[in-house]
Image (cartoon, coloured by chain):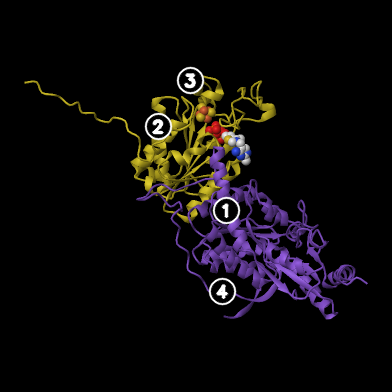
Amino acid sequence: MTRELLKGNVAIGEAAIRAGVQAYFGYPITPQTELLEYMAWRMADLGRVFLQAESEIAAINMVYGAACTGARVMTSSSSPGFSLMQEGLSYIAASDVPAVVVDMMRGGPGLGNILPSQGDYFQVTRSAGHGDYRPIVLAPASVQEAIDLTMLAFDLADRYRHVVILAADGQIGQMMEPAELPPMQPLTAAPPWALRGAQGRAPNRISSLYMHAESAEAANRRIQSRLSQIRQYEQRSLEYATEDAELLVTGYGTAGRIALSAVQAAREQGLKVGLLRPLTLFPFPEERLSVLADRVQACLVVEMNAGQMLDDVRLAVGGQIPVEFYGRMGGVVPMPDELLTVISRMYRRVAAPA
Amino acid sequence: MLQEITPVMLPVYERPAALAGVHTHYCPGCTHGIAHRLVAEALDELGLREQTIMVAPVGCAVFAYQYFEMDGCEAAHGRAPAMATGIKRLLPDRTVLTYQGDGDLASIGIAELIHAAARGEPFTTIFVNNAIYGMTGGQMSPESLEGQRTSSTPGGRDVQRTGFPLKVCELIAGLEGTAYVVRRSLHDVASIRKAKKAIVTALKVQQAGAGFSLVELLSTCPTNWGLTPADALTWVEEHMLPQYPVGDYKVSAAALRAAAG
Ligand SMILES: Cc1ncc(C[n+]2csc(CCOP(=O)(O)OP(=O)(O)O)c2C)c(N)n1
Ligand code: SF4
C-alpha cells in the first residue's frame, strides 16, 4: 500500500467507493463540492449510480429509496444543505435502513460562510431530524481518519441498520495530506429485507408509520435498544499523554487536532496536560471520559462553536471536576499558540494552584 | 330417483393477486379503492406483481404499501418521486410506481415531481386528484376549484388570493423527459375502463424505458366534500371535468411504440 497526497473531500469519495457504495446522490455546496464532483466521474467510470439531485431534500429521499433496495448508498452536504435533510434522515432512521451522510460543516447560522466550523454538533448528535433517535456520528481530524471513518461508517450503517453521519469541519474536506486508501472491497449482497420485488416470497414493506401508540412505542423501543447497543460497543476516542495529566483537554476534528499541538507544546513546558479526542460524537466516549475525570483536576473543552460538545462532556463527568470551554465561531479556526495560552492559564488556576 | 345437484359457483369477480387481502381504511364511496383495484389489475395483466416496488404517499393512501401484495415503502410527504428515483436507479429492470394524492404531488412535492419528470425517470406515477387534502380533514389543495369550499377556504376558493388550480398534466407534458402523461376520471364505469387501459399503457411505457409516465385520475372525497358517494361522482362530472379535461397530454413516439407492443 502506498501513501498518496489526497484532498479530504476526494479521499472520502474514494473511500466510499472502496467500501462498495453503489449510489451517490447529492447537491453542490461549498465546502464539500469536490466530493460530489469526484463521484460524478468516478461512479460513472465504475458503472455505479451518481445523480445530482434538484435539492438536498430530493437527495436524501433518493438515498432513502436507494437504501431500501439494500445497496450501500450515501449523500454529502454542508450545514445549510444538511438542514434540508432533517426530515429524510428521520424517516430513514425510523425505517431501519442503513445510510451514510457526510456533513462538511461550515460557518453558520443562516447562510453563514464557507469556512470550517463545528456549529452543527447539536444538530448531528442530538437527532438530525424530528423524533426520538440519534444517528451514529463520526468525527475525523485528518485525511487518513476521514478515509478510515468513511469505511467504518458503511460497516456501522449495515451492522445497526442505522444512519451514520461523518461530521467533519470544512477544513478536513479542503486540506491535502498524504494518506493511504484501503483496497477495493467487493459490493455487498442485498439483505433479505430489501425491496427488490416479491418474487417467490412474501412482500417486504418498509415504512416509518405506526398508527397506534402501542406499535409506535414498540418501534421506539426497537430504536432505543439499537442505540443502547451502539452506546455499549461503539464509543471511540484517541488519547495523548493522559496517564499523569492534571488538566484534560478535549476536542474533536480540527479543533482536537489543533488542541493536540497545544497540549504537546504545554508538555514541553512541563505542564501535565493530556488530550482526549472523540472519534465518535454519538455515541459520545463518556465511559473513557468519566474514567479520566476521576484522575484529572479539571477539563477544558475546545470547539469551533459556542460550546456544544461541552454539554456531553458535562454529562459525562457529572460534576466531578470543573469543566471550562474555549471556542471560536463563524469559521474562525483557533491557533495552537492561542490554545496554549488558554491551557497554561487554566492549568495555573486549576491544576497547580500557587 | 332424484339426484342431488351440487350448485357450481364460478367466480366472476376476484381480488387481483396484486391486491393484499386486507381491509382498507378508506371511507365508503372513496375512489381510492377503485384506483387501487385498477393498478392491481393492470399489474396482474402484465404479470408484474413480483417485480414491482410501490412507493406510497403521505395522504389518505399512506397505507397503500400494505394494500398491495408486493414490495413497497412509504415516502415522506411529497417525496415519493425522489424515493422512486433512488429505487429505479438501483433497480432499472424493476417496475416502480408512486401513488400520490394532489396535496402530496402538486403542493409539497411539486419540485420532486417536476424534476423526476424532467429527468425522464422511467417510473410511473398514479396521481389521485380529489381537489382537496383528504387526510388532514379537507383543506384547500392546489387542485381545489375556483369557489370550492374547503375548511381553509370557508368562503370558497378565491383565486385572486389563493392562486389558480394547478394543472399537472398540462404542466409536465411540455417536459422532454415525459413519455406518457394522461388524465382520466373515475366517475363512471366507462371512464373507469379507460383509466384502467391508461394504467396498463403507462406500465408498458415504463417497461420499454421510454421515459416518465403519469396517469392522473379525477377522484372523489365524499367525506370532505360533504357529499354522498353518488353526488360526489356527479360533482366530478359537473365541476372537475370542465376544469380538468380528460385526455392524452403527451404520448411520445417511444410511448406509442410501447403501447402498441
Ligand atoms: C411534512 C408534512 N406536512 C404536512 C403533513 C400533514 N398532511 C398529511 S396528509 C396531507 C395532505 C394530503 O392530501 P392529498 O395529498 O391531497 O391526499 P388525500 O388525503 O386527499 O388522498 C397533509 C398536509 C405531513 N404529514 N407532513
Ligand atoms: S377522507 Fe376523502 S380521500 Fe380520504 S379516504 Fe375518506 S373519502 Fe377518501
- For the C terminus of chain B, give its image quadrant: top left
Comparing B70 with A158, the one in front is A158
- Residue B201 location (% of width, % of height): 40, 40
Q: Secondary structure at mark 1?
A: helix
**In the rendered image of this protein, which colour is used for chain B?**
yellow
- Residue A93 location (% of width, % of height): 58, 51
Q: Is residue A123 left or right of residue B29?
A: right
**Residue A182 numbered tag:** 4
**Residue B194 numbered tag:** 2
* Chain name for mark 2: B
Q: Secondary structure at mark 4?
A: loop
Alpha carbon of mark 3 to alpha carbon of mark 4: how far? Answer: 66 Å
Alpha carbon of mark 3 to alpha carbon of mark 1: how far? Answer: 53 Å
* Chain name for mark 4: A
The numbered mark, 4 or 1, whose residue comes first in the sequence reads 4
The numbered mark, 3 or 2, whose residue comes first in the sequence reads 2
- Specify the chain shown as purple: A
User: Mark 3 touching mark 1, by CB under 8 A?
Assistant: no
Residue assigned mark 1? A225
- B64 vs A255: above or below: above
Give neighbour class at mark 3: few <14, some 14-19, many 20+ (Cα, 10 Å). Answer: some
Residue depth check, mark 2 versus mark 1: number of the one nearer the observer: 1
Q: Residue at x 59, y 26 (%)?
A: B145
Residue assigned mark 3? B234
Q: Secondary structure at mark 3?
A: helix
- Residue A229 location (% of width, % of height): 58, 58
Q: How many marks?
A: 4
Amino acid type indicated by mark 2: Lys
Residue depth check, mark 3 versus mark 1: number of the one nearer the observer: 1
